[in-house]
């Protein structure tokens, strides 16, 4: 079993660089993976941003994905990021 740590403390850490690091961690694993935080909120926010910025999903689809991963209180921060930095890449 391997362990990786990507600290996401709150909205200020919802950056393209952290999303790219999150994507690399998920992309490079060839086994089941557990992604966690205390509530799932930060994990969901990162999943939503990854869905939009990396996978090219619409804002609504990305938010839906984020909610499925546990996003609750950070939804408005995610929507703000996606409004100010739209598109994949």
Image: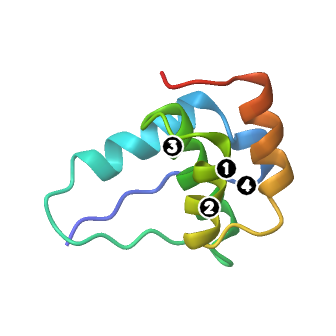
The answer to whether the residue labelled 2 contacts the one labelled 1, judged by CB atoms less than 8 Å apart, is: yes
Q: Earlier in the sequence, mark 2 or mark 3?
A: 3
Q: Which of marks 4 and 3 is nearer the N terminus?
A: 4
* For discs 4 and 3, the disc positioned in front in the rendered view: 3
Inter-mark Cα distance, 2 to 4: 22 Å
Inter-mark Cα distance, 4 to 3: 17 Å
Q: Where is residue 72 in the image (x, y as percent from the top left)?
A: 77, 69
Q: Please, what secondary structure does the residue beneath circle 1 have?
A: helix
Residue corresponding to mark 2:
64
Relative to 36, is 51 above or below?
above
Is residue 70 toward the left or the right of residue 19 in the image? right
Q: Please, what secondary structure does the residue beneath circle 3 have?
A: helix
Inter-mark Cα distance, 2 to 1: 6 Å
Inter-mark Cα distance, 2 to 3: 12 Å
Q: Please, what secondary structure does the residue beneath circle 2 have?
A: helix
The answer to whether the residue labelled 2 contacts the one labelled 3, judged by CB atoms less than 8 Å apart, is: no
Is residue 31 toward the left or the right of residue 19 in the image? left
Within 10 Å of disc 2 (Cα), the crowding (few <14, some 14-19, many 20+) is: some
Question: Which residue is painted at 21% across and 55% down in the image?
Answer: 29
Q: Where is residue 8 in the image (x, y as percent from the top left)?
A: 65, 52
């Amino acid at each position: 079993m391997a362990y990786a740590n990507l600290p996401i403390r709150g909205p200020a850490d919802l950056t393209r660089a952290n999303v790219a690091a999150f994507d690399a961690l998920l992309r490079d694993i060839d086994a089941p993976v557990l992604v966690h935080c205390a509530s799932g909120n930060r994990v969901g926010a990162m999943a939503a941003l990854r869905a939009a910025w990396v996978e090219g999903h619409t804002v609504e689809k990305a938010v839906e994905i984020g909610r499925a991963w546990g996003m609750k209180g950070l939804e408005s921060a995610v929507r703000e990021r996606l409004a100010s930095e739209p598109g994949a890449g």
